[in-house]
Amino acid sequence: MSHTVAFLGLGSMGLAMATNLLKAGHQLTVYNRTASKADELKAQGAKVAATPAEAVQDADFVFTMVTDDAALQEICLGTDGILPAMKAGAIHASCSTVAPGTNRRLAEEHAAHGSHLIATPVFGKPDVAAAGKLWLASAGADASAREKVRPLLEALGQGVHDFGDDPGAASVVKLCGNFMLGAAIEAMAEAFTLAQKSGLDRQQVYEFFTSTIFNTPIYKSYGKLVAERHYQPVGAPPAIIRKDLRLVLDESRAQTAPMPFANIIHDNLSTTVAKNEQVDWAGFAERAAENAGL
């Protein structure tokens, strides 16, 4: 079934996701601060709006994929923001990685305007998004709204997992997932460095583990980068994921759930950002090799 959809935020992830919604047959209007990023979608039949408000005024479903909490709040509540312009009953799929409290507050604002926010953070790099193979978490106060948006989410990925009525719950899942990814990268960095310092070949060790007890997509994909010490192409820039790890630490403190390992990952990402290294966020793994004199 075709729906009227607005998509706001056309970075690498947003562009891929919006393209898949267009391919699924939906009537798409897009908005991005840098308008030229919409050219590819315009050529495929999408409409391009001049403001967020213009993009959503006729939409039944609104997707946002922006950098951080401030950008999401601005696009919702700022000048020409989406909230006053959305139709009654329209559903906002909030796909950005933000603090749980941000989606909760915005959900309350939506309820006051007669619309709905469903938190729908995604897992996967831009190439995964382009292939329509994302994993999605979903949460929001209106169960019927979650069901209505689900077919559109399914057009973006290989699985949608419902985490209930609290819109902050899906955001917590996203933060937990990014922490676990970082922990896996750090573990591989230290293990492969130990192997190399002991006279073993990093690549051989990587191939052994990823074909036996760690035969999983994450260890295979990020492990390849770590084993080769080559962190291209850039999926998520280190600065973006450092923001995510800061949110992890903020939530851990709010919940009195100490996460000492998250501090290590955050610090390593900070070093990568300080060096202005244009690499995939897994590039923080290089700290282990450098510390070992490799």
Image: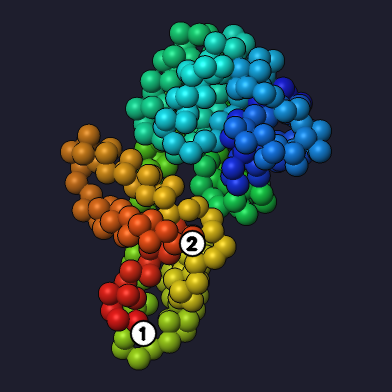
Q: Secondary structure at mark 2?
A: loop
Query: On the image, which quarter does residue 92 sit in?
Result: top right
Tell me residue 54's x, y (percent).
66, 18
Earlier residue among tags 2 and 1: 1
- 166 is higher (above) or lower (below) than 123: above
Q: Circle 1 — which element?
A: helix
> Which residue is drawn at the image coordinates 54% and 50% (left, top)?
124
Q: Is residue 273 visible?
A: yes
Give the tally of numbered discs: 2
In three-dimensional space, the C-alpha distance between marks 2 and 1, rounded to whole angstroms, equals 22 Å
- The picture quadrant where one finds residue 89 is top right
* Residue 72 as seen in the image, left or right of residue 289: right
Badge 1 is on which residue?
Answer: 196
> Considering the image in quadrants, where does the C terminus appear?
bottom left
Amino acid type at circle 1 is: Gln
Q: Residue at x 72, y 28 (%)?
A: 48
> What's the residue at 47%, 84% (across, down)?
204
In the rendered view, tell whether residue 289 sits above or below residue 24.
below
Q: Crowdedness of circle 1 by 10 Å Cα count: few (<14), some, many (20+)?
A: some
Q: Position of residue 87 (x, y in %)?
A: 62, 11
Query: x, y percentage for residue 1?
Result: 76, 26
Report x, y in % for residue 104: 39, 23
Amino acid type, mark 2: Val
Residue placed under numbered mark 2 in the picture: 279
Please rate how many residues cluster around mark 2, counting C-alpha atoms within 10 Å: few if below 14, some from 14 to 19, many from 20: some
Q: Nearer the viewer, residue 291 or 174?
A: 291
